[in-house]
Image (cartoon, rainbow, N blue to C red):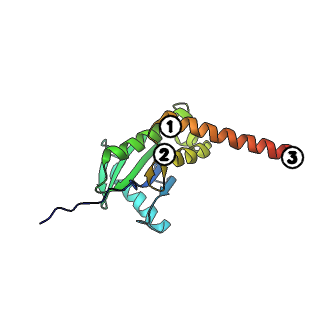
Amino acid sequence: MEPLILEPSLYTVKAILILDNDGDRLFAKYYDDTYPSVKEQKAFEKNIFNKTHRTDSEIALLEGLTVVYKSSIDLYFYVIGSSYENELMLMAVLNCLFDSLSQMLRKNVEKRALLENMEGLFLAVDEIVDGGVILESDPQQVVHRVALRVLQSAKEQIKWSLLR
């Protein structure tokens, strides 16, 4: 039997999820159509939460996917890749996301603070992963770029309010 040789791919991340204490979605971004409908996505999210919320480990193989995860107070962070994906790469994305949010939220990574700063979360995820391709794994760079984009957005809002 000849070993299966897979072509290298930049498309590493299949999904990034943030769930609350009850397993409800706060943030979800899927980068492929493994779960094409919202119903399938929510069922997958409930399954992941039920399998991981009571364990102390950081990695799971579930439904043919590699899942790395971390919890903080009342949040559960997940980065999902294919079963043959490098767990260290997925963990680097997870750590970058968590550390970026920790800096942006002044070490107060909990549900209320996250919900009040969703714009920063969206921008941070977009800086870290684009279309499943990992772009950045340094939280300092992510926080810096997010701050620049927020500042540009604020300037645009001020400009338009003055033009009215």
Name the spot of residue 85 as percent of width and height, x first: 31, 53
Q: Quadrant of the N terminus?
A: bottom left
Q: Work out whether mark 3 precedes mark 1 in sequence or the reverse, and give the earlier one.
A: 1
- Answer yes or no: do the residues labelled 2 and 1 have beta carbons within 8 Å? yes
The one nearer the camera, 37 or 146, is 146
Name the spot of residue 23 as percent of width and height, x first: 45, 53
Quickly name the residue at label 1. Answer: 100
Mark 1 crowd level (few <14, some 14–19, many ≥20, 10 Å Cα): many
- Answer yes or no: do the residues labelled 2 and 3 have beta carbons within 8 Å? no
- Answer yes or no: do the residues labelled 3 and 1 have beta carbons within 8 Å? no
Determine if residue 109 is in view.
no
State the separation of the CA atoms marked 2 and 1.
10 Å
Q: Work out whether mark 2 precedes mark 3 in sequence or the reverse, and give the earlier one.
A: 2
Q: Looking at the image, is mark 3 or mark 1 nearer the viewer?
A: 3
Residue type of the residue flagged with mark 2: Ile
Name the spot of residue 45 as percent of width and height, x first: 42, 58
Q: Looking at the image, is mark 2 or mark 1 nearer the viewer?
A: 2
Q: Is residue 75 above or below residue 144?
A: below
Q: Residue at x 86, y 46 (%)?
A: 163
- Residue 40 location, quadrant: bottom left
Mark 3 crowd level (few <14, some 14–19, many ≥20, 10 Å Cα): few
Secondary structure at numbered mark 1: helix
Determine if residue 103 is in view.
yes
- Residue 115 location, quadrant: top right
Q: Residue at x 55, y 36 (%)?
A: 143
Quickly name the residue at label 3. Answer: 163
